[in-house]
Image (tube, rainbow, N blue to C red):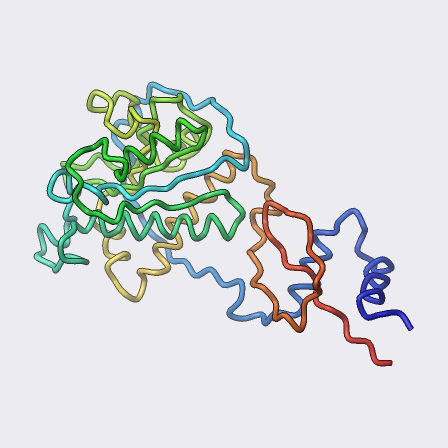
Amino acid sequence: MPSRSALAFILLLISPVPLAQPLLAQTLLAQAALPREPYGQFLRVKVNTGERSRLTVKKNWLGKRRLNPTVPILVLAGHADSQGISPGTRGYAVAVNGARPMQPGITDETFWNLKTAQRIVKLGRQRGLNIRFYDPGVRTIHNGDDPRTNWSQGKRHAQAGGYALEIHYDAYGHDGLGSGVIPRVYGGQTVIDEYLAREFGSFPWDFRGVLGAPKRGITILEVGKLEGDLENKLRNPATRDRALNTIADRVVTTMAQALDVPKPVFQMPALPTLPANRATASQQPSLPLQIPPPPAINVTR
């Protein structure tokens, strides 16, 4: 009598799923063994990131440099290494309303820069992007060229052909200019910069005489002013997680579109690994989105 794995292979061959779609067949088999809830949930909440940069009308660059869909993406949290030097905005809630900072020792902007950058990377990995997060760990590094700084890590990454993105939130009130992209200068503006500018707004490439990060090949994304609905949704424990999901989803989706990541692959949620006793031992070829092999089919003798 044929083995179980042989029978599974025969059933797959004669199934109505076309052999030209092995990825779809794998996914359907794997999903059939998973619970419907809460798997696949991606909870979001509507978040108003406020006005787009007032300098969008002065955009003087065009992101034309194309990147490979598998380009390594490095995500950084603005001001994560410069507390006490260039700490970032405290946000409206703390500076005006007297609310407690989200975390002692760092500004609220830095806190949300870290949380947002981490969420972008988490979602990006789930959706098949070659993306990672860097945290210097030390919150005050006086030498900007110290190898542990965002600048040094981002510069090294850009020089190696990768794409580096630093997350920021803009100042509240009249001091802030709104959401938008300050594109990298070293290495030239890319299609990711262009797509993010369409989504969030933009700043001139020479904003404030060219900032330190863009000089080193790091693009800056100002998510929005740290005030109003955006800040309220982030600070409220009931909406915080979903607000971070919403912001990360906008960034990750925009980057995937810029890189021409195939839409069906990108939209497919990453499947958790099935229990060992329900998965075959065969190893599937490497794919942009890792899909576990189909479960073994139990056949009554």
Which is nearer the eye, 250 or 277?
Answer: 277
Q: Is residue 260 above or below residue 115?
A: above
Q: Could you tell me residue 239's position as x and y percent?
A: 32, 62
Nearer to me, 103 or 99: 103
Q: Is residue 137 left or right of residue 194?
A: left
Q: Is residue 195 left or right of residue 281?
A: left
278 lies left or right of 261: right
Res 12 → quadrant: bottom right
**Closer-to-camera residue (135/263):** 135
| Residue found 21% across the figure and 20% down from its top | 209
Please name the residue shown 21% across and 42% down the image.
Answer: 81
Instruction: Examine the image and state in which quarter residue 210 appears.
Output: top left
In this view, the residue farthest toward the front is: 147
Rendered position, 270 above or below 62: below
Give percent across and percent down for residue 137: 25, 49
Residue 80 rendering spot, x and y as whole percentages: 23, 45
Q: How many marks?
A: 0
- Residue that sits furthest to the right in the current view: 1
223 or 19: nearer the eye? 19
> Which of the image's four quarters has the N terminus?
bottom right
